[in-house]
Amino acid sequence: MNAAIRTIKYLILIASLMLGLRVPPSAQAMPDSFLLPEIKTDHPAMSNVDILIDVGHGGIDGGTSHGNLLEKDINLAVAKKTYDQLRQSGYTVLINRMDDYALSGENKWLHTRSRHIKDLAQRAHLANEVSAKAVISIHVNSAKRPAKRGAIMLHQQNERSQTLANALQQSMNAMYEIENEPVLGKTYYLLKHIKSPAVIVEMGFITNGEDRELMRSEEGQQKLAAAIAAGTEAYLKDVPPSSEESEPPRSGS
Ligand SMILES: [Zn+2]
């Protein structure tokens, strides 16, 4: 499949999301307990997505920072490179932003004053609509202690997310030449609300000089993308096409 067709499919998806996800104002509710409306629309073009790349932050939401170095920019740069690498390996990949904007602006269906919740809900929605075999959410870490470094994977409380996190952690550790452990991301909105195996990839610490240089440089970003792509591929190769799910993902195509 060529790039143009994929781009078109993605645009179709966005368009159908915008049309399909409007819910009445009564959906207003407390953060975290509001409804993620059930979508019953058919998206045959989207039934075989291997990987959804969630690019953390964007627009007004810069994420963490160090001087004029912003997390949102690092996330986008590495995510695009990861996207390219995975596609070159023949996977069907979606990325939820290709530029610097806030996903909360695309969320016309959830009525809440919290821009942050709107943003996260939009990401979770897209992920559940696409139903990818793996969702990787790209982020940058920060810590009080500047010595803290390396990548840390946050996973859901299920085996497949854990397996994905382990594969990614192993790949990132090898690149960094350190031994960090994946962590259960119990309180993370995205991990709680995405049904596919999802992992938050905290690529490195912006508070650590070495990590910062890696994440800032073109060459370092390429290395990070290669490690993320390799970890994701290792997971996908190990997961049988029709797993324990009641509905095999390929049945609709
Ligand atoms: Zn972040």
Image (cartoon, rainbow, N blue to C red):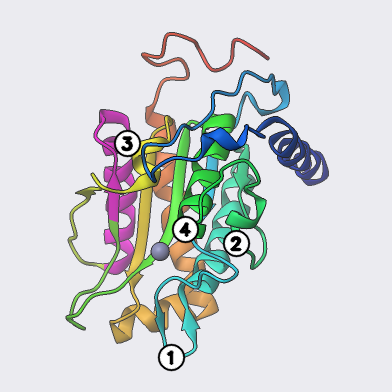
Above or below residue 150? Residue 9 is above
Considering only order in the chain, which callout, 2 or 1, is on the residue closer to the N terminus? 1
Horizontal and vertical percent position of residue 25:
60, 37
In-image side of 100 versus 222 (left or right): right
Numbered badge on residue 40: none
Q: Amino acid at mark 1?
A: Gly
Question: Which residue is tagged 2?
Answer: 102
Q: Is residue 215 visible?
A: yes
- Is-magenta flag for residue 168? yes
Gap in angstroms between the C-alphas marked 4 and 3? 24 Å
Above or below residue 208? Residue 63 is above
Dot 4 alpha-carbon crowd within 10 angstroms: few under 14, some 14 to 19, many 20 or more: some
Question: Which residue is tagged 3?
Answer: 161
Image mark count: 4
Give the SS element for disc 4.
Answer: helix
Question: Which residue is tagged 1?
Answer: 67
Closest to the camera, between mark 2 and mark 3, is 2
Quadrant assignment, res 174:
bottom left
Give the SS element for disc 1.
Answer: loop
Q: Amino acid at mark 4?
A: His
